[in-house]
Image (cartoon, rainbow, N blue to C red):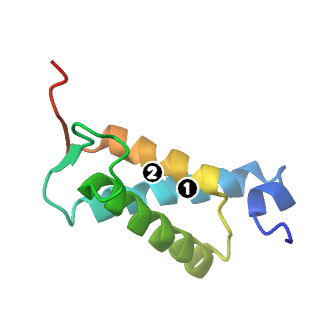
Amino acid sequence: MAIRYNLWLDPDNTAQHRAVEADLERYFMERFADYPHIRLFGADPYDYDAPFNRLYDALMARAAEYCERTWCYVASPEQLNRCFFRAVGRSNKFVQDDRS
């Protein structure tokens, strides 16, 4: 398996990595606007059919394609994950169930 991730191939290009990550975070925020409020997890955080988990999988794939198409940049899974959860933290679209 060849290394494809730009972060690994050119780790010193921090300006590009930061720009791509900022754009990815914006990308996720814009995609969240397309959905009604989404409940975070619920009783079983490992329910892979839960709306949040299905959304995560779909948006990860779309974001990777967006990054390659727009930036000619292959984001690492860690970059995608970090940007996604930063966007979740900033978004008002997510509602957490009471754990009491």
* Left or right of 81, for residue 16: right
Asked if the residue under mark 1 is in contact with the one under mark 2, i.e. CB atoms within 8 Å, the reply is yes
In terms of image quadrants, where is residue 13?
bottom right
Furthest residue toward top: 100
- Identify the residue at horizontal 33%, vertical 40% (top origin): 45
Q: Which mark is residue 84?
A: 2
Element type at mark 2: helix
- Identify the residue at horizontal 50%, vertical 49% (top origin): 83
| Above or below: residue 37 compared with residue 35 | above
Crowd class of label 2 (few under 14; some 14 to 19; many from 20; radius 10 Å): many
| Above or below: residue 97 compared with residue 33 | above
- Identify the residue at horizontal 14%, vertical 51% (top origin): 37
Residue 87 image point, x, y percent: 39, 47
In terms of image quadrants, where is residue 98?
top left
Query: How many marks overall?
Result: 2
Element type at mark 1: helix
| Above or below: residue 96 compared with residue 94 | above
Residue 96 image point, x, y percent: 20, 35
Crowd class of label 1 (few under 14; some 14 to 19; many from 20; radius 10 Å): many
* Left or right of 70, for residue 28: left
Q: Nearer the viewer, residue 68 or 23?
A: 68
Q: Amino acid at mark 2?
A: Phe
Residue 7 image point, x, y percent: 76, 56
- Identify the residue at horizontal 53%, vertical 50% (top origin): 81
Q: Quadrant of the N terminus?
A: bottom right
Q: Which residue is mark 1?
A: 80
Q: Amino acid at mark 1?
A: Leu
Q: Which mark is residue 13?
A: none
Quote the CA–CA distance across marks 2 and 1: 6 Å
Residue 9 image point, x, y percent: 85, 61
Q: Quadrant of the C terminus?
A: top left
In terms of image quadrants, where is residue 48?
bottom left
